[in-house]
Amino acid sequence: MNSGSVLGIFDSAELLVNAIPRVKAKAQGRLEAYTPYPIEGIDKLLGLRKSPIGGMVLIMGVIGAISTILFELWTSGIDYPLTTAGKPHLSWEAFIPIMFEVTVLFATFTAGLGMLLLLNRLPMFRDPMLSAKSMPLITRDKFALAVEFSGSDLDVDSITKLFQQAGAGQVEVIAKPAPVGAVSPNFFAGLFATIAVSCVIAGLLMYWAIKLFPVSPPISHMLVQPRLNSQRADGFFKNGFGMRLPVAGTVRRGAVSYSITSQENAAGLVNPYPRTNEILNQGRRTYNTYCSVCHGILGDGHPMLTAAYGAKPANLVSQQMIDLRDGEVYHVIRMGRNAMPSYTADLAENERWATVHYIRTLQRAMNARDDDIK
Amino acid sequence: MGSDAVVFPENIPEGLKPPAILVGEVNAGGLDDQVHSHLYRRPPKAWFIAFAITSTFMLTGFGCIGYTFWLGIGAWGNNIPVGWAFDIINFVFWIGIGHAGTLISAILLLFRARWRNAISRFSEAMTIFAVICAVIFPLIHVGRPWLAFFLFPYPNQRALWPNFRSPLIWDVFAVNTYFAVSLLFWYLGLMPDMASLRDRTLGKVRKVIYSVLALGWRGAASHWQHYERAYLIIAGLATGLVLSVHSVVSFDFAVSLVPGWHMTIFPPYFVAGAIFAGFAMVVLALVVVRTTMNLKNLITDYHLEVMNKVILTCACLMGYSYLLEAFTAWYSMNSYIHHTFMQYIGGTYWWAGWTTITCNILIPQLLWFRRFRRSYTGMVFVAIAVTVGMWFERFVIIVSSLHQDFLPSSWHIYKPTIVDFGILFGTFGLFFTLVLLFARVLPVIATTEMKMILPGSQPLHKGGSHE
Amino acid sequence: MNKQTDKRLAATAALGLIGIIAAGLVFGWSRFWANWILWFLFLLTIGLGSLFIVALEHVVGARWSIPLRRVPERLSSLAVLMGPAALLALFSLHFLYPWTKPENLQNPVMAGKAVWLNERFFIWRVIGCVVLWAIAYWVFVSGSVRQDRDHNPSFNLRARRLAPLFMVVFGITITIVAFDWISSLEPEWYSDIFGVYIFAGTFLAGLAATTLTVLYLKSKGRLPEIKPDHIYNLGGFLFAFTVFWSYIGFAQYLLMWYANLPEEVLWYKERLQGAWGPLLLVLAIFHFLVPFFLLIPREAKSNPKFLFWTAAFILFSHWLDLYWMIFPVLGHGMHLGWPELSFGFFSIGGVLLWIRHSMSRGADMPVGDPFLREGLGFRL
């Protein structure tokens, strides 16, 4: 036996504490005490270094705090600026609680796992102490002092005598096997093999699970709840419409009174809005929202709804329509014509005139001349 | 921690003598035998009866949760404007129960109150079980629990992040952190005890389980040094955490504009209430445990008396908060707050308001008298009253404040359904089932911590005191 | 007892006195009374905080703090000394407090509050509080000093019985202080956590003043039995209650910031305008961040010199906190100049003289306490 340790087993903490300086003075080799509970001040007697755990926790806590608040600021203020509760995007006040929680999480796990894995090198099931005869005594109510030796620099008998003089009830010598690293190459091989096998098994299980069991959202009550869809027929109302129509005589906010009753009389109206880029864009938006459903996105009367609709909507880019005066087009938008309803309640004055401008643009675009290209 | 060596002057009157936190002769070995003995014994008939009852409740509760999943939140009585009811009441109730455990294990550790060592393990376990009961509710009340992972910030196809300005997201972080930290703290405390069990058990399977859980702990002084330091640091952090968790829970309400919810005193008031309810629950459980498991020499009358004093302190803090709530309802000169407060004490749910005041403020005042602090009947009566009162307090805050919102046309009387009650009692079943299992398979007293405070255990501290 | 120091302190106080009278004549009496309220509350919170520490020890039956107890006991005489100061401060009502102005009764909110905020009731509340504190001082401090001579343990029994009652009284009176002297500077404003906020500051001020005095006495060799372990505990408490103050302060700010209700944010609106905004930032750094990081290391809490300056810093931050709450009521920007300095000279010089004087009488420790020995043996 050329390395190991000699254990002196003491009956009380007091005997152990008294023995430490005596053994320390005479014996070479590292001293270690094994106790059922922490004895305060024993670290100083044994000459242990101060635990670095406080510094580790502080550093990790600060890292947790800074990284969390930066992450919150970045996600809520920069990557996806989300406006809620009328607060500024970079509202640090609201980010403090989570910052605090994550800081505590980082710090606690640094303390707990850092203590276990880094400082104490646990789990460790192969330490020779664990199979010592005196281990069950130590975890119960006895106290052990160990002198570690390597090579033949230690006289076991003299240490034994020293322990007995200090009041040790028993002395045990345990051999230390050749030092084994906490993680051996075999350990890594085993770890990777386990991970690989688990992946394959999990993949197969997933495959069979999807194959054998129909996959569906667990509960769809909230998706299929009864409701009226605006563009669908529905028996709930007498006229069978899912959507409610505005009450007769409804006008839009800011409506201007309009007394012209026939299309011919409206021919004299002049579009009061200039043909600017802005107005045309406004017209396009309005047209695409309200008109294109029936008249088609290009104004040529080929919309998606045609088939479902009895009559064919007017082709707005035909010569007949080009010949209409601005006022007449405006009048139709305002009052409706044939199957087309009135848009009094939906559109504002400027939107109607902007739409007229836009229809003119469509007409010009759909009737392009060869020399336009030049 | 060796108060044994202190010589007291002769003329100390009876009432000033330091209380006994241990009764009779207790030594380290005997302590292990006493605390571990019931792990090897077949539990008594009463245990099985209790287990049958609690697990029936638990399964009923699970059934109700399943029904909720199948039908949707419509299975509950919630309806606009009372969009939050039993789900959040129970969540706040249970998370509050958990706070007592952290207080005992962490805060009292920092204050070096030695009496906490006997009850720390038990109350920490109650923390963990209470948080388990609590997290059920936010999970099921989201309506689509299978999408709950949306709450975590992870890069996703939708390019969306959680709304970090929402107190509900703060809750997710607070409660998860709380659970993780409590579990770690509990496990670290348990580890040396596991080593002790490992070296004493005779069963082969048990030996393997205990060995793995002990992680090869061998009680080396160099390990204890880091262990003690880490334990103390975690206790300090857990103290901040326990304040923050219930404060964040209170923010769920207090950042809103709902009268009766938006009160600046909510954070400390919720923390005090949580500790209040938690201590009541610990007292209830300890009364049962110390008699049925023969632990009267370790959990003494003094322990119960101190806990009753904490309950009384919390009752006074609650009284202070209620008083300020009433004062502010008037002093703010805000008719909405005033109306809501009058609803608390004279509205549809007046009985809930007065139950709260009676159970939380008036009944605990009995504890000013030593007789009540020391008698089982007295303390059980108060503890039950506090548990009921604290549940109703959350009922008042949530339902009474919501049922009359700013728009009188949408006022609505909330009525819970049988499913609501099923889930509430189901979590009680779950909680006590877990407590019973815990008492069966793990040491209910932290023997390692107890060994630290036995006479003569700290020879380097002659003549010192730790209080 | 060093006569030289006494003379210097007296000269400082006298210089301050001349300064404050001159300030009143030069700058008008509003600023004079604002200073008066500020320094009165600063000293009162130190006194009340110390009284609370004394009572807390009796409530929880702490042993470690017994050897230190004489210091907060002496400091708590400030709470009684501030009784006359409070009565004089009543003259400030018409200068600083808007609710005393009859024209403000047109405002329905202030008119409604007049039941509480009227001068007669206010004066009765002030008198009531002063009397209660004086009784508490007599019970806890005079009793303890008497015990030095007769060594009668019945004092401990009485103190233990009465301390919980005092806690109730203290909770109510400190809330009244908060609502009356500070919150009612903005009578339309309300915050139900405000009493807790002022309590946190008060306790911290008492702790910081106690720590300062203990460490000063120790450096003069007057408390040789006090071990680093005792000092460490003081440092730990300072750390904990720095965090507690920040928690309460932040909770109040967060909730008001989030809800953004006009009647709530007016407090912060006044106190964030102009130079006051940066001052709040300074307050957050001085009152929380700096002491927090200074007190984290284990060594920092038991190093007497280090802890002395940290405690002084915390006490200064507490003064800054009160300044930030009280002075915006004057309007027209920040007032900080020789009038404030004169008040500082007067108050600090006078108080140090008072404390030195009271410290020179009797024992430095409660030598009659039966548990003193146990407290001296305290180790971490």
Image: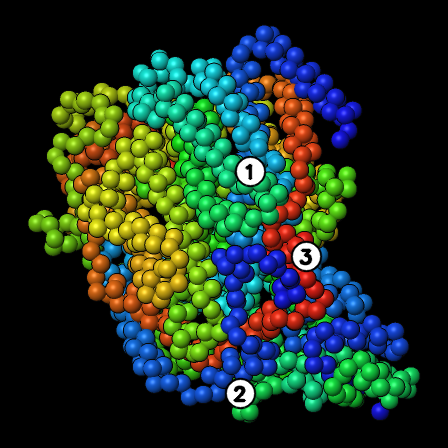
* Label 2 SS: helix
Chain label for disc 1: C
Residue C142, disc? 1
User: Which mark is nearer the camera, 3 or 1?
Assistant: 1
Residue under the point 77% across and 25% down: C3
Marks 3/2: CA–CA distance: 44 Å
The mark lying in front, picked from 1 and 2, is: 1
Q: Splitting the image into 4 quarters, where does residue C310 fall?
A: top right
Q: Nearer the viewer, mark 3 or mark 2?
A: 3
Asked if one can make out residue A219 in the rendered structure from this viewpoint, the answer is no
Residue C154 horizontal/vertical position (percent) = 52, 49
Q: Which residue is mark 2?
A: B206
Q: Which quadrant of the structure image shows residue C14?
A: top right
C-beta proximity under 8 Å, tags 1 and 2: no
| SS label for mark 1 | helix
Q: Total label count?
A: 3
Chain hosting mark 3: C
Query: In the rendered image, is residue A279 in sight?
Result: yes
> Between A144 and B72, which is closer to the camera in this rendering?
A144
